[in-house]
Amino acid sequence: MSNVPETERSPTAAHQGPARSWGEIAARFAAAMARDDFPRGDLAELRRMDPDAPNAAAFWRLLAEQNLLGNADIESKWALILHGIALMTNTAESRTGHAGNMPVGRALFLGGEDSRDTAFFSETRLNRLLTARGPMMRTLLARMFRMMGAGRPFDWREMARLILYDGSREDRAENVRRNIARSYYEAERRSQYAGSQ
């Protein structure tokens, strides 16, 4: 039996009323962390937190607010998501880590530029990330989130699905991986075309 519900709903959605997708919850977390009233100490705690052994009170508080407590595997996956969002949130620039119109692959290729000759996140790194599973994928993602803190925000709805489906709904995780590859190479093609003009 899958640890991630078929409908992408949170485990306690039946008790909350309308269904919420994993992506919607991730976007909500990103918006909360970017607000001026989000405690900077909590953001720092989430950045420092080891997502494999989450011990930050801010992490547990955020999960409780969204009724995501109760499944250790899901909690562990949300720890990586919240850690990544925190690393990519730039409070000095009032920048959220989430950009709903920026596919992950495109953000990885472009970094902070609108066009570039070479990828911000190398093709080798991308291939390693997209072929990794389980603990190795978590390690590579944590590194990528640190790197993207200097890059540009991306669609956390897409990234949350990859993390939450890994190891439980591989068909859906594979679809996300393919979408990341497509948007990365499309960004590469557009940059090459722009450079030849």
Image (cartoon, grey):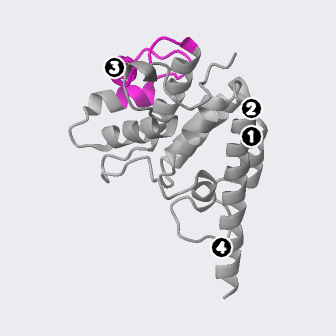
Q: Which residues are magenta?
A: 44-72
Name the residue carrying label 4. Answer: 191
Residue 170 is tagged as 2
CA distance for labels 3 and 1: 31 Å
Whether 66 is among the magenta residues is yes
Extreme-bottom residue of the structure: 197
Name the residue carrying label 3. Answer: 61
The secondary element bearing badge 2 is classed as helix
Amino acid identity at mark 3: Arg
Q: Kindly report which numbered mark, 3 or 4, lies closer to the viewer in this rendering.
A: 3
Residue 128 versus residue 98: which sits nearer the camera? 98
Amino acid identity at mark 1: Glu
Q: Kindly report which numbered mark, 2 or 4, lies closer to the viewer in this rendering.
A: 2
Q: Residue 41: x percent and y percent?
A: 28, 28
Image-quadrant location for residue 167 = top right
The answer to whether marks 2 and 1 mark residues whose Cβ atoms lie closer than 8 Å is yes
How would you rate the neighbour count of disc 3 (Cα within 10 Å): few for under 14, some for 14-19, many for 20 or more?
few
The secondary element bearing badge 4 is classed as helix
Which of the two labelled residues, at mark 2 and mark 4, occupies the earlier sequence position? 2
In the picture, measured across the screen, residue 180 lies left or right of residue 111, that is right
Q: Kindly report which numbered mark, 3 or 2, lies closer to the viewer in this rendering.
A: 2
Please tell me which residue is depicted at 63% across the width and 59% down the height of the picture: 109
Q: Quadrant of the C terminus?
A: bottom right
Amino acid identity at mark 4: Ser
Residue 174 is tagged as 1
Extreme-left residue of the structure: 37
